[in-house]
Image (cartoon, helix red, strand yellow):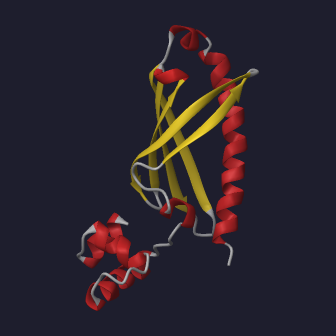
Amino acid sequence: MKDVAARAGVAVGTASRELSGSSQTSPDSRSRVLAAAAELGYIANGPARSLGIGSCATVTAALGGTTTDVTIEVVETDPPRRIAERNVSAAGRRLAHGTYTIEPLRTGGSHVSFTYAWARVPLADRLLAPVVRAATRRANRTVMQRLATELARHASP
């Protein structure tokens, strides 16, 4: 989105409004934004478009027979290419940051990568970290497969 805005010579918010079909913009900026999007090969990503800073969800994570509620908040976004989140769990004792990077493939589809880092974690969790990492890798593979399926479903006409 930032690249499209820069190429069109407009603010990111203007480019976003133009690409979402808002009627609050001028015909001149609309034509510049649409031309820039076409030149750059910009493809809108439906699921990512709906995520904005401050979007929150609470999910229940299960690991080793125990469950915990995790609050996930979007803290930074550059749809459709990047989404950064903050995760808070264990009644606020655990804090982590994650970043999804979504790159369209020339052959169709998207490549999604995810980085995750703990900012605050209790001692018992640190001691169990090797077991948790192995379980998380397995869970992430499953999640990424589901995400790829969902993205493909949204991209299909």
Taking the view exactly as shown, the residue that stands out farthest to the bottom is 27
| Residue closest to the eye, 130 or 84 | 84
Q: How many marks?
A: 0
Please name the residue shown 66% across and 32% down the image: 61
**Within the image, what quadrant is residue 13 found in?**
bottom left
Task: Please state the horizontal and vertical placement of residue 47, each as a whole percent of the image.
Answer: 56, 61
**Within the image, what quadrant is residue 29 found in?**
bottom left
| Residue closest to the eye, 88 or 8 | 88
Task: Please state the horizontal and vertical placement of residue 108, each as a whole percent of the image.
Answer: 63, 69
Q: Quadrant of the C terminus?
A: bottom right
Task: Please state the horizontal and vertical placement of residue 137, each as a whole percent of the image.
Answer: 67, 32
Please name the residue shown 54% across and 13% down the image: 126
Please name the residue shown 59% across and 56% down the image: 111
Please name the residue shown 33% across and 88% down the image: 31
Q: Quadrant of the N terminus?
A: bottom left
Q: Is residue 32 above or below residue 97?
A: below
Taking the view exactly as shown, the residue that stands out farthest to the right is 65
Task: Please state the horizontal and vertical placement of residue 145, each as a whole percent of the image.
Answer: 71, 49
| Residue closest to the eye, 76 or 37 | 76
Q: Is residue 86 above or below residue 1?
A: above
Q: Is residue 122 above or below residue 96?
A: above
